[in-house]
Image (cartoon, rainbow, N blue to C red):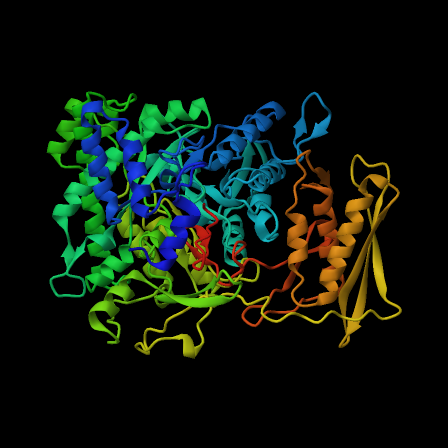
Amino acid sequence: MLTPISRQIWEAKYRFTPTGAAPERSVKDTFARVAKAAASAEHEASRKDWEKRFLDAMADFAFIPAGRILAGAGTGRDVTLFNCFVMGEIGDDMGSIFANVREAALTLQQGGGIGHDFSTLRPKGAPVKGVGADASGPVSFMDVWDAMCRTIMSAGSRRGAMMGTLRCDHPDIEAFIEAKADPARLRNFNLSVLVTDAFMEAVKADARWPLIFEGTVFREVSARGLWLKIMRSAYDYAEPGVIFIDRVNAANNLAWCETISATNPCGEQPLPPYGACLLGSINLAALIENPFEPQARLDEARLETLVPVAVRLLDNIIDVSRYPLPSQEREAKAKRRIGLGVTGLADALIFCGAHYGEESGRALAASWMARISQLAYEASAALAREKGAAFPLFEADAFLARPFPASLPSSLQQAIRQHGIRNGVLTSIAPTGTISLLASNVSSGVEPVFDFEFSRRVLQPDGSTRHETVEDYAVRIFREKRGDAPLPPAFVAAHQLTPAQHLEMQAALQRHVDASISKTVNCPASIPFEDFEMLYADAYRLGLKGCTAYRPNAVTGEVLTPASSEEQPPAQPALPLTAAVAREAHAVEPIPRVREPVLSGFTYKLKWPGSDHAIYVTINDSIEDGERRPFEIFINSKNLEHYAWTVALTRMISAIFRRGGDIGFVVEELKAVFDPRGGAWMEGRYVPSLLAAIGDIVERHFIHIGFQGEASEHAPRRVHSRVGGEGEQVGRVSLANYCPRCGAPGMVSQEGCRSCRVCGFSTCN
């Protein structure tokens, strides 16, 4: 029986409703579809048997394939079942750049998230031979990728997600670090700096650091100063993250046949060019016997049965999936990479009375992950023996010399040497925000419970709304068993843990994971910069492959806000509950403002490339309580091609201005419009459409008059400004705290993603 939020997630994201046929009636139908598709890779005589085993593994949510598999397997749709890819190397020429844009678009169109390393592009100002021009630099071309991604989204596909990386010794590294200080720029990218061991040594020694491209040193900077720029940007804007790229390559199972320079959007999968990975999670919360009792324990027998079935299902999906590009199919089938991970970890620890932030909790979690990893290797080796086929690039000596396989029991190593292994990489811990909601809101991935309950606003058929309380899975089970008894000490939420405790859990698990882990180290807004910086140094010291820390800030928004006291159920004073309160933005209609006979304003000239005539945008303001407020807008041009839509636009925006209330969204809506014929380069950056350029003007006007907007009851929207290049004053309307799908405040930052706990929206899906 699905909980209301689980049903809503299933219906919105995974339920198959074929044209002209009956839709799936339950989540069991969805799992049956996936099981049948995965079993189609088996010999015909054994398909029904494996179909049943696959279904049994999923039926109680003990194993949950990733979202792309649930949504696409067995539907016949032209979509990939792989969640993530890293794209090919970008050659330093226009032909290769735009060929890569095309490949990225095709991959995003089929539902795959992508990663790109932009370190191969020459820095800004470097000469371009043969054309007498200077290069615009990798960050400028990232704007092209960002515009493409938004265009794919506007065409009706799922939200695109991209990772952009740049080496710490690239001459444009400082521009890359600062790129997302502008919260409206590169919004479809996560950014990470590729940090080398040599750089970390230079930081430690406070040495000079050369910035190099193709063997030419462009300049030298202070290594310590560059490190502090990375840290300050992460502290102020939550980006970029850090990938310890030398460690990634040194620990890679397949280091002898590939070099990695990028990851998927959430960082749990470092991948080579055209690399891809399938994801699936063991739900630890579903495997705990006797929860809240002294004898609570993980069901080892069930785990030993479950892991081999999960490995086999994922391996079969490699053969039944579609691929956006032939190069991705060749890469996937040559190495047969999978990413088996976990979800529900925090709830499982709570069931066992283990505290997430204490050594006992970390040791228990690490023991579970170690067992899953060994079982996965055993299953993959058995699969290679059964099918008589290891992954095609398998080389026994090279593979067994890698750090992770070398730590396996000698008997298992011998079996691998004799028969090979089916999959080159086996384990990874991915974000599971949406599938964890599907599984009755278990804790997500390896994250602690973010909030033990929150409120959802649900729209009724008659247009009214009702509120429903969504409980964490462990809380619900506890209430069923113990009623209103106080929550035991093991019930610990993310905000009750220190950043160091987050990091130590990630480190404890990384030792038993082939690839990497998607995890966000949540920090309080008040954390001193020095302590924040130390987290990343500690991440390197603890052997992590990367680090993403999130501190609430003015650009990316706050995390969930506390519920009002009447919304909180009785609980221990030491364990306050938090809630995301859905925004009631339209509960009270604002009263339209009356126009004064005379208004003052400003007229802005806009010259759009390709148009013979300039466009003039006039915004008039009213004076209310001594402050200027936008009241109306006029858009005029001699170019009659634009006449009809400019009149419609001026009337609509003016009506919004006059009604008052929160009007900051106008800027974001205009700037999100992308012209399928292409945008234009203006003042050194890519503007995706004429309407987006008008949005820039409206935003500039807001900043110029010091307009702050009107706040909703729960969370204000503010205009933040900073000094841009050449002394230009720029700024953005901060909307990051509101879900772009349902409008609720309190987007959660965890697992490398920004996710909504009200509707399930995620920036990684």
At 20% from the left and 38% from the top, the residue drawn is 53
Decide which of 578, 394 is in the foreground and name it: 578
Position of residue 546 relative to residue 76, above or below, is below
At a point 53% along the width and 66% down the height, the residue shown is: 583
The x and y percentages for residue 309 are 21, 37
Where is residue 422 drawn, in percent x and y? 24, 27
Please give the name of the residue rendered at 18% of the width and 56% of the height, measured from the top-left corner: 288
- Which quadrant: the N terminus? bottom left
Q: Position of residue 477 (x, y in %)?
A: 24, 64
Q: Which quadrant is home to the C terminus?
A: top left
Is 178 displayed left or right of 577 in the figure?
right
- How far across and down, in percent of the image, does residue 705 sit? 76, 64
Residue 23, compared with residue 350, is above or below; it is: above
Residue name at image x 57 percent, y 72 percent? 713
User: Camera-side residue: 7 or 339?
Assistant: 7
**Above or below: residue 474 compared with residue 397:** below
Confirm whether residue 547 shows in the render. Answer: no
Q: In which quarter of the image is residue 317?
A: top left
Could you say which is closer to the camera, residue 689 or residue 420? 689
| 69, 506: nearer the viewer | 69
- Number of numbered discs: 0
In this rendering, does residue 251 appear at all? yes
Q: Which corner quadrant of the image does residue 413 belong to?
A: top left
